[in-house]
Image (tube, rainbow, N blue to C red):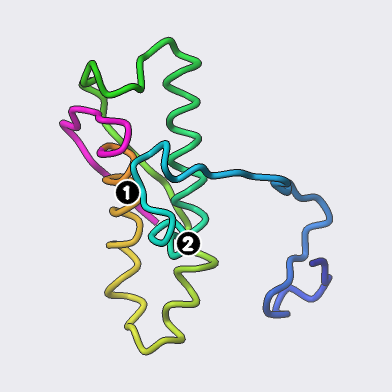
Amino acid sequence: FYDEDHSTPEKTYSKIGGFVKNFEFKSIKYRIPPKMAERMDLVQKFAIKTAEEALTDAGYPTNGKQRLPIATIVGNSSGGDAQRLSNKRIIYSEIKYRINEATSQKISNLIDLRNFFNFSSA
């Protein structure tokens, strides 16, 4: 992925990176049909699983039996899959905010939060 030329597309000029290996997203656990999960942006999958793990680590239930009054805030640079959408005749500037917002809403709905505040920003 490295290229010292900052303007080279699909490359990075950073020599240091973090890479996720062997990531498993069990969509059924989150009530997402497998066919729908195949079409989901990888960022959404990471965000959903990370949110659940963070709540579990903090001692909050994520089983849907107790709705939690917790806000969902997602920061996303809208790279990767969102950028590829612009190549499919969808106007990127119109949809990028909806994609980010969808991630935040999906987390809230799937973990059954009583979401008083839902915010995403690029």
Identify which residue is drawn at 30% across, 35% down. 72
Q: Residue tagged by mark 2? A: 38
Residue stretch rendered in magenta on the structure: 109-122
Q: Quadrant of the C terminus?
A: bottom left
Nearer to me, 78 or 108: 108
Q: Residue furthest top?
A: 59
Where residue 1 appears, x then y in whole percent? 79, 67
Where residue 22 appears, x then y in whole percent? 71, 45
Q: Residue tagged by mark 1? A: 120
Q: Amino acid at mark 2?
A: Glu
Q: Secondary structure at mark 1?
A: strand
Q: Is residue 14 left or right of residue 117?
A: right
Nearer to me, 108 or 9: 108
Q: Earlier in the sequence, mark 2 or mark 1?
A: 2
Occupied quadrant, residue 59:
top left
Asked if residue 78 is positioned above or below residue 45 in the image, the reply reads below
Q: Amino acid at mark 1?
A: Ser
Q: Secondary structure at mark 2?
A: helix
Asked if residue 103 is positioned above or below residue 14 in the image, the reply reads above
